[in-house]
Image: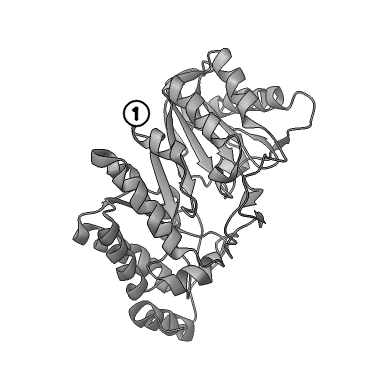
C-alpha cells in the first residue's frame, strides 16, 4: 500500500535514557513511555501500530511532518520484525561535553545502568524471533563503553549476526569493539572528535583526553587491517568554536596521520540555535559544512551521509531567518581565519 511513512515507524525501537520510543530522531521524535510504566514495551508497540493505521489514512503525526525520513511509497506490511534498535546510555560518561543535552554523570568507572538493563530486552526480542541478521543496533551516549553490560551485549548480537555501530568519544579502548569491527557484517565505530587540535578538544569536551583518543583510534585501525574503513571520525560543527577552515584542516591532517578512511559531519541542533523554528544558522556553520565535504574529497576520505544535517543546512527542516550584517561579517572572518 502506498502512503507516507518511514522505516523507524515500521520497525524501530529506541531504548532511550528514560523510556521506550519507536524512533530516535531527536529533533521532533515521539514522547517516550517510561520503563517503570506497566506494560511499557507493549504500549510502545501498540502506539506504533496505531500510527501506521493513521498514516495509511493520510494522518501524519505533528512530530513527523518535518522529518526528512518521511517518504511516500509502497510500504510493506509491518511483520513484527525490528529493523533498528538504538541503545542509549545517557547516564555515564568519561567526558563532559559542553553540548550534552542531559549532562551525563562524569566518571572514569564502568557502571551498571541505573535506568534499565538492555540485556533482557534484547534477549526477549531474540527469543521471540523479532531480530534478523540485517537488524541494525546503534549504541549511543553518554559513552556506551562505560556500561558494564556493553561487552556482553556486543557478544550476544555478534552471535545473532546483527549489524552494529557504536558512537563513542574514543577516550577508552574497548576490546569488544575490535571483535565487532572484525566480524563479517560491516559493523563500525564512529568516534566524535569534533576538532583537530588539543586546545579545541578541551574547549568542547571539557577534559584533556585528546592524546588518549588518538591512541584509541590508532589501536582500532591497527587491529582491523583491511577493515579499518569501519573506524569513522565525526566532526560536529559548533558556531564560533570549530566552524573554521583552520580547525577542519587540522581534523583532516589528523585523519591522514592516523589512517582514517571514513568521516562524518553534523551540526548541533542546540548550539547552532536550531532547536526551535525560525532561528538563525551562522554562515560560518554552513560554509564549514560545505568546506568539510570538499576537504574529504581532497584527502580521498569517504563522507558518511547525514540526512538530518543535510536537511538543516539546506533549510528543509527549519525556516532560518536572515542574520544581521555585522554578525554575518564576524561569522565570515571566523570561518576564514578562526577569529573569535
Regarding residue 314, the answer to whether it shows in the image is no
For residue 136, side relative to residue 152 (left or right): left
Residue 282: where, in percent of width, then height? 46, 72
Q: Which residue is drawn at the image coordinates 32% and 69% (left, top)?
A: 250
Q: Quadrant of residue 189?
A: top left
Q: Which residue is drawn at the image coordinates 47% and 86% (left, top)?
A: 326
Please give the residue where the numbered disc 1 appears in the rendered image. Answer: 185
Q: Which residue is drawn at the image coordinates 52% and 26% (left, top)?
A: 11
Q: Secondary structure at mark 1?
A: loop
Regarding residue 137, the answer to whether it shows in the image is yes
Note whether 329 is above or below 126 in the view shown.
Answer: below
Note whether 198 is above or below 327 in the view shown.
Answer: above
As rendered, which of 11 and 176 lies closer to the eye? 176
Residue 253: where, in percent of width, then height? 28, 66
- Looking at the figure, which quarter contains the N terminus? top left
Residue 128: where, in percent of width, then height? 58, 13
Q: Which residue is drawn at the image coordinates 31% and 47% (left, top)?
A: 221
Residue 279: where, in percent of width, then height? 55, 66
Note whether 128 is above or below 263 in the view shown.
Answer: above
Q: Quadrant of residue 313?
A: bottom left
Amino acid at each position: 500500500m502506498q502512503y507516507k511513512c518511514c522505516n523507524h515507524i515500521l520497525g524501530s525501537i529506541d531504548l532511550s535514557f528514560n523510556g521506550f520510543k519507536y524512533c530516535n530522531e531527536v529533533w521532533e521524535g515521539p514522547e517516550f513511555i517510561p520503563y517503570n510504566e506497566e506494560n511499557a514495551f507493549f504500549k510502545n508497540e501498540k502506539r506504533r501500530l496505531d500510527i501506521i493505521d493513521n498514516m495509511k489514512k493520510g494522518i501524519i503525526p505533528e512530530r513527523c511532518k518535518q522529518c526528512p525520513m518521511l517518504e511516500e511509497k509502497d510500504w510493506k506490511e509491518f511483520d513484527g520484525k525490528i529493523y533498528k534498535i538504538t541503545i542509549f546510555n545517557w547516564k555515564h560518561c568519561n567526558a563532559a561535553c559542553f553540548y550534552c543535552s542531559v549532562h551525563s554523570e562524569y566518571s572514569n568507572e564502568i557502571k551498571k545502568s541505573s535506568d534499565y538493563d538492555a540485556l533482557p530486552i534484547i534477549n526477549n526480542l531474540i527469543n521471540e524471533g523479532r531480530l534478523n541478521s540485517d537488524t541494525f543496533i546503534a549504541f549511543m551516549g553518554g559513552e556506551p563503553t562505560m556500561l558494564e553490560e556493553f561487552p556482553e551485549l556486543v557478544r550476544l548480537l555478534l552471535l545473532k549476526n546483527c549489524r552494529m555501530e557504536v558512537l563513542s568519544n574514543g577516550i577508552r579502548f574497548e576490546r569488544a569493539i575490535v571483535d565487532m569491527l572484525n566480524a563479517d557484517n560491516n559493523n563500525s565505530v564512529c568516534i566524535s572528535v569534533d576538532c583537530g587540535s588539543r586546545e579545541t578538544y578541551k574547549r568542547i569536551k571539557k577534559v584533556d583526553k585528546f592524546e588518549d583518543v588518538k591512541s584509541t583510534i590508532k589501536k582500532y585501525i591497527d587491529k582491523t587491517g583491511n577493515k579499518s574503513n569501519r573506524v569513522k571520525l565525526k566532526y560536529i560543527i559548533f558556531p564560533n568554536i570549530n566552524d573554521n577552515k583552520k580547525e577542519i584542516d587540522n581534523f583532516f591532517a589528523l585523519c591522514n596521520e592516523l589512517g582514517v578512511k571514513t568521516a562524518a559531519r553534523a551540526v548541533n541542533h542546540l548550539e547552532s540555535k536550531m532547536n526551535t523554528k525560525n532561528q538563525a544558522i551562522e554562515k560560518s556553520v554552513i560554509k564549514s559544512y560545505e568546506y568539510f565535504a570538499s576537504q574529504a574529497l581532497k584527502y580521498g576520505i569517504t563522507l558518511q551521509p547525514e540526512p538530518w544535517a543535510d536537511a538543516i543546512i539546506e533549510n528543509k527542516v527549519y525556516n532560518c531567518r536572515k542574520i544581521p550584517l555585522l554578525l554575518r561579517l564576524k561569522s565570515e572572518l571566523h570561518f576564514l581565519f578562526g577569529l573569535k
